[in-house]
Amino acid sequence: MTFLRWAGSKKQIKETLSHCWHAAQTAGGNGRYIEAFCGSASLFFHIKPSSALLVDINAELMECYEVVREDPSAVVALLQQYPVDQEFYYRLRATDELVLDPVERAARFIYLNRFCFNGLYRTNANGRFNVPYGAGRTGSVPSLEVLREASEILSNSELIHCDFELALSGAIKQGDFIYVDPPYAKRNHSLDFQYGPDEFGVGDLNRLFELLEMANDAGAFFVLSYADCDDVEEFSEKWGGYTVEVQRSIAADTSCRERTREVLISNL
């Protein structure tokens, strides 16, 4: 299982998505799994592929995966020293990650992820993580057993921090399985917060559509998950899509968390 909490994670529909993976392997897949916008990589950790390429524009996230892959014991040893309280959370959040070594940065990333509000990753206009403390609705740090298992699953994976098109153009091979769960495209730029150095816009979504067309031409299989909205209507009509219900987890009060529809679009 994934060791991170992540707003927008597809953990709720991982079984549906895993059926797509197995269908691709039956149809001639080569066993390689590719995921752009990987986030918590819940599908990747669920299916445990023997070969994978994980991509995300979030540098801290990808470094965290690298460190967990190489030295999970060191990360857990540090996490076990951290007290679970609001004061320490804000002190660690305020720490400049650039003065830390890679293991310290990975432990910081996991701690803030586990104890922030609803597993959000959000930065301000200066690129600083600014999600508040979760006030008890959080959970606990992952155990050594969990991180060792994650390390093993990551052992045959290539991890890339960059734009999805730069990472995947030229890297897609016949029989690859590609899963993409991009951020919802923003039409109005906001200076309040953002996921990375650049917000994901409608132009980026169109770039992604073109990349998936290229993947299909190369003989690869793809699955795209996205909000059931006009942005993907034309692409869905071309390839065929079906809707699934998911529960949004942003609201603080769990009784107020609404169910919404997403569409899965695939060339399978």
Image: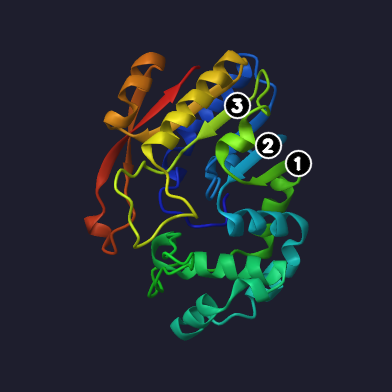
The answer to which of 41 and 2 lies nearer the viewer is 41
Ranked by sequence position, the earlier of labels 1 and 3 is 1
* Res. 228 mark: none
Q: Residues within 10 Å of mark 3 (few under 14, many from 20)?
A: many
The amino acid at mark 2 is Ala
> In the rendered image, which quarter is residue 153 located in?
top right
Ranked by sequence position, the earlier of labels 1 and 2 is 2
Q: Are marks 1 and 2 in contact (CB under 8 Å)?
A: yes
Helix or strand or loop: what does disc 2 sit on? Answer: strand
- Residue 237 in picture, x, y percent from top left: 34, 16
- Give the residue at mark 1: 156
Q: CA distance from mark 1 to mark 3?
A: 16 Å
Residue appearing at x 60%, y 19% in the figure: 220
Tell me if 255 is positioned left or right of 156 in this view.
left
- Residue 159 in picture, x, y percent from top left: 68, 45
- Give the residue at mark 2: 52
- Give the residue at mark 3: 177
Helix or strand or loop: what does disc 3 sit on? Answer: strand
Compared to 261, does 83 lie above or below? below
Ranked by sequence position, the earlier of labels 2 and 3 is 2
